[in-house]
Image: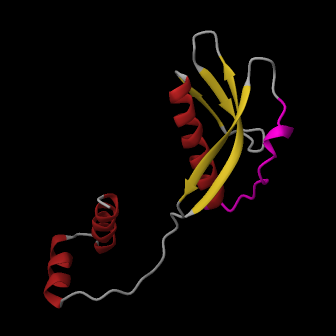
């Protein structure tokens, strides 16, 4: 898992919501209904933006130093962390009993999907 930290600019809106943008990452913009929600949305936007860039082999600039990020009066800058999982598929060789393989084939299941679902459940339980 790769970890990224980027400065985000939080712009307060008249209705109490916040618009968030990342000066270093073009098009990485989000909005939150409250400050708490905006912080959550900022992390989610950063994670999704980096995952999409990585998946599409798009390079992006390193994070700016927080003190160098310009912002307008009333706005504030905060560092946001994203833990990005590499979602690219990898091939693995596995062994299962023949009777299981026959049942998988007969039922039309995708062995890859079943294994992924089981592993996700196992890892989320920890």
Q: Main secondary structure of the magenta part?
A: loop
Residue 62: x and y in percent read 78, 54
Residue 52: x and y in percent read 60, 53
- The image shows residue 8, relative to residue 2, as above or below, that is above
Q: For the point 58% across and 10% down, which residue is it?
A: 15
Residue 48 or residue 108, whichever sits in front: 48
- Tell how many labels: 0
Quadrant assignment, res 60: bottom right
Residue 19: x and y in percent read 64, 25
Tell me if 97 is positioned left or right of 27 in this view. left
- The image shows residue 123, relative to residue 68, as above or below, that is below
Examine the structure image and report whether residue 114 is included in the region drawn in magenta.
no
- The image shows residue 91, relative to residue 109, as above or below, that is below
Tell me if 62 is positioned left or right of 21 in this view. right
Screen quadrant of the C terminus: bottom left
Quadrant assignment, res 125: bottom left
Residue 106: x and y in percent read 15, 76
Q: For the point 77% across and 38% down, which residue is it?
A: 23
Residue 89 or residue 73, whichever sits in front: 73
Residue 45 or residue 102, whichever sits in front: 45
Screen quadrant of the N terminus: bottom right
Residues in magenta? 55-70
- The image shows residue 26, relative to residue 58, as above or below, that is above
| Protein image colouring | secondary structure
Examine the structure image and report whether residue 61 is included in the region drawn in magenta.
yes
Q: For the point 66% across and 18% down, which residue is it?
A: 12
Q: For the point 52% across and 36% down, which residue is it?
A: 40
């Amino acid at each position: 898992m790769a970890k990224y930290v980027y400065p985000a600019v939080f712009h307060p809106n008249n209705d109490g919501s916040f618009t968030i943008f990342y000066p270093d990452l073009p098009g990485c913009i989000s909005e939150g209904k409250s400050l708490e929600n905006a912080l959550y949305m900022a992390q989610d936007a950063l994670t999704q933006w980096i995952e999409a860039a990585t998946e599409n082999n798009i390079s992006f600039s390193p994070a700016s130093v927080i003190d160098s990020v310009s912002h307008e009066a009333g706005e504030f800058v905060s560092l946001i962390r994203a833990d990005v999982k590499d979602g690219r598929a990898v091939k693995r060789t596995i062994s299962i009993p023949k009777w299981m393989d026959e049942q998988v084939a007969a039922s039309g299941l995708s062995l890859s999907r079943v294994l992924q679902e089981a592993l996700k459940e196992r890892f989320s339980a920890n």
